[in-house]
């Protein structure tokens, strides 16, 4: 009996490998996004602490130098927060791009797998038909040999 060989097997294997590497890349990108979000949360906590310090400095005994220093720190942290928000947005966009690529690769792989299944089903049916044809020929041959030997 013949062996089934999918004519696009190499392409399917390439698609599977591309999908695996894209999934790994997606995992790395998601991890990076989480790190950036955690850093943004740390900046928010620092900003809240500086706000509390500023409020405490304004009440009670007023120290102008301390207030200026805290305001400068708040401005610097707000700038850092703006940069971090941009980094989080960039990381999120990267995750979305990679996720879209993974979806496309998965769809391409599934199309090839369905094609392979259809071709295998055709191969299987052809094999069954060939087997049936051989059985019919065998029965016909045996019937002819019995007729020839029975007539003498």
Image: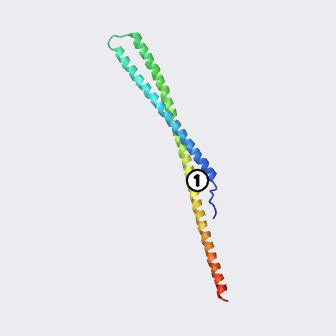
Q: Residues within 10 Å of mark 1 (few under 14, many from 20)?
A: some
Residue 97 shows in this picture: no
Residue that lies at the very extreme toward the bottom in this rendered image: 152
Q: In which quadrant will I find the N terminus?
A: bottom right
Residue at 60% in and 63% down: 123
For image coordinates 43% across by 26% down, the residue present is: 42
Q: Is residue 86 visible?
A: yes
Residue 88 on image: x %, y % = 49, 31
Question: Against 138, is 92 above or below?
Answer: above
Most foreground residue, 68 or 145: 145
Which residue: 45% across, 21% down?
A: 77
Q: How is the image coloured?
A: rainbow
Residue under circle 1?
Answer: 112
At which x and y percent is residue 12?
Answer: 60, 51
Q: Secondary structure at mark 1?
A: helix
Horizontal side, residue 38 vs residue 118: left or right = left
Where residue 9 appears, as percent x and y from the top left, is 62, 53
Between residue 128 and residue 111, name the one nearer to us.
Answer: 128
Q: Residue 130, image x and y in percent? A: 62, 69
Horizontal arrangement in the rendering, residue 50 relative to residue 109 (left or right)? left
Quarter of the image with the C terminus in it: bottom right
User: In the image, what residue occupies the spot 56% across and 58% down?
Assistant: 117
Q: Quadrant of residue 70?
A: top left
Looking at this view, name the residue that lies furthest to the left. 60
Of 15 and 141, nearer the camera is 141
Q: Nearer the viewer, residue 110 or 94?
A: 110
How many numbered dots are placed on residues in this image?
Answer: 1
Compared with residue 31, is residue 150 higher up or lower down, i.e. above or below? below
Residue 135 quadrant: bottom right
Q: Is residue 73 left or right of residue 123?
A: left
């Amino acid at each position: 009996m013949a062996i089934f060989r999918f004519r696009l097997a190499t392409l399917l294997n390439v698609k599977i490998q591309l999908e695996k590497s894209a999934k790994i890349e997606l995992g790395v990108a998601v991890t990076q996004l989480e790190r950036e979000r955690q850093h943004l949360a740390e900046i928010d906590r620092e900003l809240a602490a500086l706000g509390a310090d500023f409020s405490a400095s304004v009440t009670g005994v007023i120290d102008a130098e301390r207030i200026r220093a805290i305001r400068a720190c708040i401005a610097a942290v707000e700038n850092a927060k703006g940069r971090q928000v941009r980094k989080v947005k960039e990381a999120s966009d990267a995750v979305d791009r990679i996720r879209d690529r993974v979806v496309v690769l998965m769809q391409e792989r599934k199309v090839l797998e369905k094609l392979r299944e259809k071709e295998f089903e055709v191969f299987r049916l052809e094999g069954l038909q060939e087997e049936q044809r051989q059985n019919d020929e065998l029965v016909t041959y045996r019937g002819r040999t019995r007729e020839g030997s029975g007539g003498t």
